[in-house]
Image (spheres, rainbow, N blue to C red):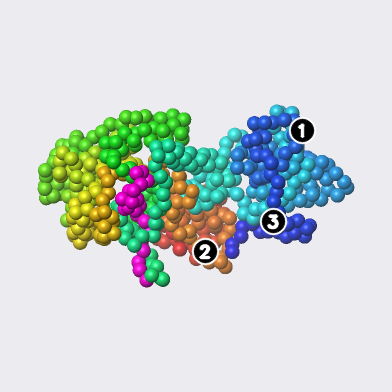
Amino acid sequence: MQLSEQEVVRREKLTKLRELGINPYPADLFPVNHNSKQIKESFTEEKQVIIAGRLMSINVQGKASFAQLQDAEGKIQVYFNRDIICEGDDKTKYNDVFKKLLDLGDFVGIEGELFTTKVGEKTVRVKDFTLLSKALKPLPLPKEKDGVVFDAFTDPEMRYRQRYADLAVNPHVKDVFIKRTKLFNAMRSFFNESGYFEVETPILQPIPGGAAARPFITHHNSLDIPLYMRIANELYLKRLIVGGFDGVYEFSKNFRNEGMDRTHNPEFTAMEIYVAYKDYNWMMEFCERLLEHCAIAVNGTTKATFGEHEIDFKAPYARVTMADAIKHFTGFDITDKTEEEIFAAAKGMEIEVDATMGKGKLIDEIFGEKCEGNYIQPTFITDYPKEMSPLCKEHRDNPELTERFELMVCGKEIANAYSELNDPIDQRERFEHQLKLAAKGDDEATEFIDFDFLRALEYGMPPTSGMGIGMDRLIMFLTNNQSIQEVLFFPQMRPEQRIAADVILTDEEKSLLDIITKAEKIDLVELKSQSGLSNKKWDKTIKGLTKKDVAKVSKTDEGLFVEAL
């Protein structure tokens, strides 16, 4: 294990604490009876309190010191006085334990009384303190000088990889996740009050169905069968409608073995709801009311800012058919066109298409490239071609279309809904068509037929409308976050670079290697500029990295470049 100088010092302090008979990781309960928020809201002079949290700043001033204690609700100032903490002659607890052996990031429990300082700061006067957990690694705390913040913990990759440190030093990050929970609670209560039933369905499935996506696959040793991580829960929820439930919903963890970007994570949360005896027109109105309710619950208003846009989730929302949308933005009418004609049109629009794509996929590509990004305010795109919707009921007025809508916000789909297909013969034919597309090379077409689901439909499923909402994407819009990684506690990351255990790096080498790793390959001059090191330190540091075989400098026609090994 590679340790920095500070980490070595902290371990030495750990040893000294134990030599003093202090357990740096005590097992017994600490009887907390207040938090920082409660103290500030119901402040009374001389009130006795017991609090606990992290030390986030320490200002030692001889026999009296001030510190900032951070708990789950915020920060509170605490005052350490040597003669109050150590009433007798033995001043070890203050002079040695507090002044020399405690560090920023340590968890301490404090018993004390409230008072107000001369400058009006609500403060806890410490009567006694207990070390609850020794922090062996320094938190990446920002530094402040003359009102300017330095070394803030803002690097996205580091923040996502070390979310625990991010939450500790950037308390505002917690607000996003509080709002996320408010969204789930608001949606859940809306459904429950409507009389619908929350359920759980399998995550490991023998057949991945309910969506067009590439699944993760595993193997069940005992049954000796392949199993697939859930890509959607649709087919299981419909089975419950067959079984006699009038309305079911689930917040489901789904997994898709596909690309990662600012709006996609391989593991994500979707909400799906199915209601018997309804159609997609009813579901559109239900969706509007739901999202209006959720926006108010999360932000106190129907309006939300996302980047440069102000979105208003107040119902009703505009409704535009898929054909009208494509015609409006491209001039091309997809109505009654053959696959060949649509393929030629897409080519003419300079959209990348190939022979593996069926009619539905071609239309989807045209819409995605030319139309989708133009819908900023919540807009329902309706009446999708049949080829794009293998689980959706045929449109009542046009057999070439389906009764489907997607809700677009800021150019992204956040909800998808159908009048569900309940004709088992039609459903079988649609599944078989998907198999033909898969054989043709469409890697998103369904490669399986779920015969058990077809059997369920044959028992009879009532007319049903279903809707799925991408919860991660929705909370992005409600909290003004451009990246899905910001609204997931622990987004999927590339493996962290590991250095051999016997390689010890200096702080400067670690910092420089971090820049190199993030850039993958960087110009030597640019690297020196970014490092901020003096000429002497720069030479020593870059030579150290190359000597320890963790980075190399290579010469090309374009100049000298550095890359991590």
Q: Are marks 2 and 1 in contact (CB under 8 Å)?
A: no
Amino acid type of disc 3?
A: Ala
Amino acid type of disc 2?
A: Ile
Work out whether mark 2 precedes mark 1 in sequence or the reverse, and give the earlier one. 1
Image quarter in which the C terminus is found: bottom left
Residue 225 placement: quadrant: bottom left
Q: Nearer the viewer, residue 375 or 26?
A: 26
Residue 416 rendering spot, x and y as whole percentages:
30, 43
Disc number placed over residue 27 in the picture, else none: 3
In this rendering, is residue 179 above or below 495? above
Residue 72 rendering spot, x and y as whole percentages:
60, 42
Q: Residues within 10 Å of mark 3 (few under 14, many from 20)?
A: few
What residue do we see at 38% from left, 67% from top?
219
Q: Nearer the viewer, residue 142 or 34?
A: 34
Disc number placed over residue 499 in the picture, else none: 2
Work out whether mark 1 precedes mark 3 in sequence or the reverse, and give the earlier one. 3
Taking the magenta stretch, the answer to whether it contains residue 243 is yes
What residue do we see at 26% from left, 51% from top?
460
Residue bounds of the magenta highlight: 224-248
Q: According to the image, label 1 marks what residue?
A: 46
What residue do we see at 55% from left, 57% from top?
509
Q: Residues within 10 Å of mark 1 (few under 14, many from 20)?
A: few
